[in-house]
Image (cartoon, rainbow, N blue to C red):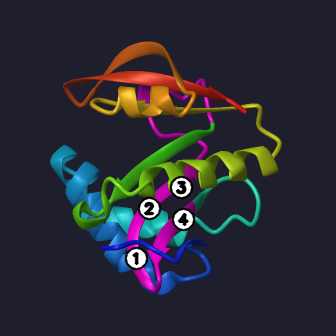
Amino acid sequence: MNGGPWRIVRIADRPEFIPLVANWLWDAFWQPNGHRLEEVREILADADAEVGTPQSFVLLAGEVPCGTASFMSADLEIRNDIGPWLAGVYVVPEARGQGCAQRLVAAVEEAARQAGHESLFLYTNDAQGFYDRLGWYAIGEAVDNGRPVTIMRRDL
């Protein structure tokens, strides 16, 4: 995928992308934890806030969807005391290494700013270095479905 022109759309404005994006997220994050594909589709269909949560975004290279990220009020069940969250950052393998994830993270950060939030949270089990480079910092460790994760924060 040679990139560009890149643009980000809200999944609420392009619901035809829900099945594809749901498959990406289910394969990458949800199915290994025993969730049904239909649950992911429902979450994406409900991500229709004009401002605030929930919103899901799709990065397009021309008209080809190549990544997604979401702005959610909650994402890690054991930490419902904090939020909102950057969630479900996923880029298709052929588009990786082209700044796609960074574009998606920036879109969610901007959505959080527009909603009046001063900070945003995420959790990751393997991408802490990536988020460190974008200005996020670790605030703690947790265990999610039997695997260690790092909880991170970004001050907006």
Amino acid type for the residue under numbered disc 2: Thr
Do residues under tags 1 and 2 come within 8 Å of each other at their CB atoms?
yes
Front disc: 2 or 3: 3
Q: Residue at x 47, y 83 (%)?
A: 62
Q: Quadrant of residue 151?
A: top left
Report how far apart the C-alphas of labels 4 and 3 lie in the structure.
10 Å
Q: Secondary structure at mark 2?
A: strand
Identify which amino acid the numbered label 4 is placed on.
Phe
Residue at left offset 59%, top offset 24%: 81
Question: Mark 2–mark 4 contact, CB under 8 Å?
Answer: yes
Look at mark 2 in the image and give the residue it sits on: 68
Label 2 vs 4, first from the N-terminus = 4
Which image quarter: residue 82?
top right
Three-letter amino acid code at disc 1? Pro
Asked if the magenta segment contains residue 65, the reply would be yes
For the record, the magenta segment spans 56-83
Q: Which residue is mark 1?
A: 65
Residue sitting nearer the eye, 7 or 33? 7
Disc 1 secondary structure class: strand
The answer to whether the residues at label 1 and label 3 have Cβ atoms under 8 Å apart is no
Mark 1 or 3, nearer chain start: 1
Q: Quadrant of the C terminus?
A: top right
Q: Compare residues 148 and 93 and report the one nearer the observer.
A: 93
* Residue under pointer 4: 57
Which label sits on residue 103?
Answer: 3
Q: Residue furthest front?
A: 2
Question: Is 117 in the magenta?
Answer: no
In three-dimensional space, the C-alpha distance between marks 2 and 4, rounded to whole angstroms, equals 5 Å
**Which of disc 3 and disc 2 is earlier in sequence?**
2
